[in-house]
Image: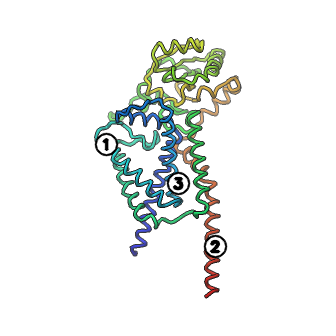
Amino acid sequence: MNRDRFLWIVVNTCRLLVSATFIFSGLVKLLDPVGVQYKIQDYLIALDLGISPESVWLLVAAVALSLVEFLLGVYLFFGIRRRLTSWSLLVFMVLYTPLTLWLAITNGVPDCGCFGDAVRLTNWQTFGKNAVLLMMVIIIWWQGQRMTRFISESVQWMISLYSIIVGLFIGGLCIVAEPFIDFRPFYVGQHIPSAMEWPEDPMALPEILDFDIDPAVLEDTSYTFLLISPHVELADDGAMDRINTTYDFARQQGYRFLALTASDTEAVHRWLDLTGAEYSFEFMDELVLKTIARTNPAIVLLHDGRIIGKWAAGQLGSDVLTSDSFHEMVAEAQEPEPPFASLLYLFVLYALPLVPLTLADRIVFALKKWIRSRRKTKNN
């Protein structure tokens, strides 16, 4: 094998591995932008940077970071703007690799959040992963001209614009509503009592820790509505009417309704005065509540200790909360797809329009090349 062939294989192998990593990382973050915001807050606290954790700009930064990762992976795969993409990846990894080394040494943030909640790595595993990625990115940057284009320059803007629109749509949807693909331990279908049991392996931990709630709630064979609000003083007050509608429905049907918060008693009293709510509150750790639901407030529906529904509170209204609609909704919610299968399905939906576009582009490119070759032969 000659040198050029060897370098072509190495560069394009690195290109595919790096692009797959960035597409996966960006996509799982776009599916949980609020979770990325929480992780950015953890970094700010660890670095002792005085930025308000509730700043809307942190959420904007979370979406932007997730979208950039996703786009860099897509650009690298298709060979779009190869020079800009390789430089951007190099800058990205040169910044991130030392940061993850610092995390590995100091353990300032227990989990880097590189792949959201989908894949959890230790800080040393994260540094090792980034060190390998950095080496591959250096090879791509050094020999970027050897990357084979999968799309012509004339139509690459279509893939770019399409990917931006899809990324922003997914990120926006998962801000206003609960993530529709959930990698957290409180996913729809999870049986909480089983997930709280200690495994036989003494080195392992239960899937769910610190869910300190009245055991009667988890043992209730009927339905229980949980109103989740880490901080009621920051809750979306536009959802108040729908929360009260949900409470009225639960009371009429004889179902339990309980609010969970990490706010202090004074904030809870203000909420009760403002909303006229009659339901009771229990206090729980803020981190647990933020893990259960990303929207504030959110509604979680339990049945015999199993999560069978999770919604942003504003999604439930009188049109949904009729007896027939409720049971139909519950029946649909009890059969969730495994998250990685759902992620694969989402990626296939994203990629489907790109297949005919890429094939058509390659056919046109081959025809043009053949025509030029024929003309050159005739002229000779």
In the displayed structure, does residue 190 sit left or right of residue 242? left
Residue 289 locus on image (x, y percent): 47, 26
Amino acid on which the number 1 mark rests in the picture:
Trp
Residue under numbered circle 2: 368
Q: Which quadrant does the C terminus fall into? A: bottom right
Please give left or right for residue 317 compared with residue 45 in the image: right
The residue that appears at 55% across and 13% down in the rendered structure is 272
Q: Where does label 1 land, which residue?
A: 102
- Where in the figure is residue 201, as x and y percent of width and height? 35, 35
Q: Which residue is mark 3?
A: 74
Neighbours of disc 3 within 10 Å: few (<14), some (14-19), many (20+): many
Q: Which kind of residue does numbered mark 3 sit on?
A: Val
**Residue that protrudes farthest toward the front in the picture:** 50
User: Of label 3 and label 1, which has the lower sequence position?
Assistant: 3
Please name the residue shown 37% across and 51% down the image.
Answer: 94
Q: What amino acid type should be assigned to the residue bearing mark 2?
A: Lys
Quick one: 306 or 374, which is closer to the camera? 374
Looking at the image, residue 368 lies above or below residue 212 = below
Q: CA distance from mark 3 to mark 2?
A: 26 Å
